[in-house]
Image (tube, rainbow, N blue to C red):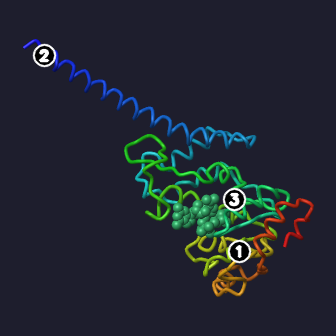
Amino acid sequence: MVWYKRKENIAGGIIAAVAVTLILGLSLGLTRRQKTIKSTFFSRCEKFKEHDCQKLWDLFEKAHVNKDPCNVPVEAYDPLIAAAPFIPDCKKMMFWSGTKDVVHDLTAKRKDCYFTLEDTLLGSILDGLMWCGKNGKDDTFTTGCPGWSDCENNPVRSFWKCASAAYADAACGDVTAMLSGSTTTPFDPESIFASIEVTRLKAPRVSSLNVVMVLQMNAKSDCTNASLKNLQNQLDPNITYSCKDVAEHRVEQCGSQPQIMCGSCW
Ligand code: NFD
């Protein structure tokens, strides 16, 4: 009898210990995940002076926290975007599609020449991050979130649509777009550049759109590609269009040789 009791007590103790460890582990894990995106947000935000990072974080969370992660509309991020307006530099604005790495390798080294959405406050804070909220939860999660194509109204996609629209609205002067010659449809109607940014460029604020078609080895398309006709049809007719085929190594050269004048990169 006594022996049975002792065995029961030991088993009960083990179960309780396992339960406590699991609960502690789960809540610690949750806090750590929370901390990771929150601390990334703040450390990136604090690199930009004169911004209330706490206010931006609160607006960011308000857009998706406690919501179905497949039902966050683009407009949910309007208050966040409005709190951090874009300050365009009309001589440098760069758009891109399918060329993220080559563009950012270049802009990291040639801030004197080019400026992308990812160089703006919100673009630089949220670039490369994944997040979502969940119904009935007060946290921002970074795992278990819908992927880019799992549902249209996921928070990451909605944020980038909202930010891209505001960035294109702010565009001015001569703008550049780097497209990829490695695909058969460099101006892809599904892309954010085609579906949101191009149609928001407006003359006379914007005077020209200069496409740089980045050509890698075995390129599949160049400036003669049929999809670029659609680009021209969608573009405000008072904006001057041009397209130049440029080898990728030439773009890289522009980054590695700061003595090259911005206008002579290609
Ligand atoms: P893109 P875009 N799966 O190269 N922007 O024209 C996953 F997982 O096709 C900036 O659509 O060019 N991710 C950012 C995907 C994001 C998928 C969106 C996919 N199937 C838009 N498709 C940014 N900084 O992240 C697309 N993505 C994601 C603005 C992936 O992260 C910029 O101002 C990919 O790198 C730029 O002028 C990114 O979306 C234009 O819109 C862009 O896809 C580029 O959008």
Q: Height in image: 263 above or below 220?
A: above
Name which of mark 2 and mark 1 comes first in the sequence: 2
- Give the tally of numbered discs: 3
Q: In terms of image quarters, where does ligand 1 lie?
A: bottom right
Query: Around disc 3, counting alpha carbons within 10 Å, would you say few (fewer than 14), some (14 to 19), or many (20 or more)?
Result: many
- Callout 1: CB less than 8 Å from ligand 1: no
For residue 105, side relative to residue 220 (left or right) = right
The type of residue carrying mark 1 is: Gln
Of marks 2 and 3, the one in the foreground: 2
Q: Which residue is identified by label 3?
A: 117
- Callout 3: CB less than 8 Å from ligand 1: yes
The type of residue carrying mark 3 is: Leu
Name which of mark 2 and mark 3 comes first in the sequence: 2
Name which of mark 3 and mark 1 comes first in the sequence: 3
Gap in Å between the C-alphas at discs 3 and 1? 24 Å
- Name the element at disc 2: helix
- Residue 96: which quarter of the image? bottom right
Contact between labelled residues 1 and 3, with CB atoms less than 8 Å apart: no
For residue 85, side relative to residue 3 (left or right) = right
The type of residue carrying mark 2 is: Lys
Outermost residue to the front: 3
Quadrant of the snapshot with the C terminus = bottom right
**How far across and down, in percent of the image, does residue 262 sit?**
88, 65
- Name the element at disc 1: loop
Of marks 3 and 1, the one in the foreground: 1
Q: Which residue is identified by label 1?
A: 216
Query: Around disc 1, counting alpha carbons within 10 Å, would you say few (fewer than 14), some (14 to 19), or many (20 or more)?
Result: some
**How far across and down, in percent of the image, does residue 166 sit?**
66, 61
Residue 5: numbered disc: 2
- Name the element at disc 3: helix
Contact between labelled residues 3 and 2, with CB atoms less than 8 Å apart: no
- Residue 52: which quarter of the image? top right
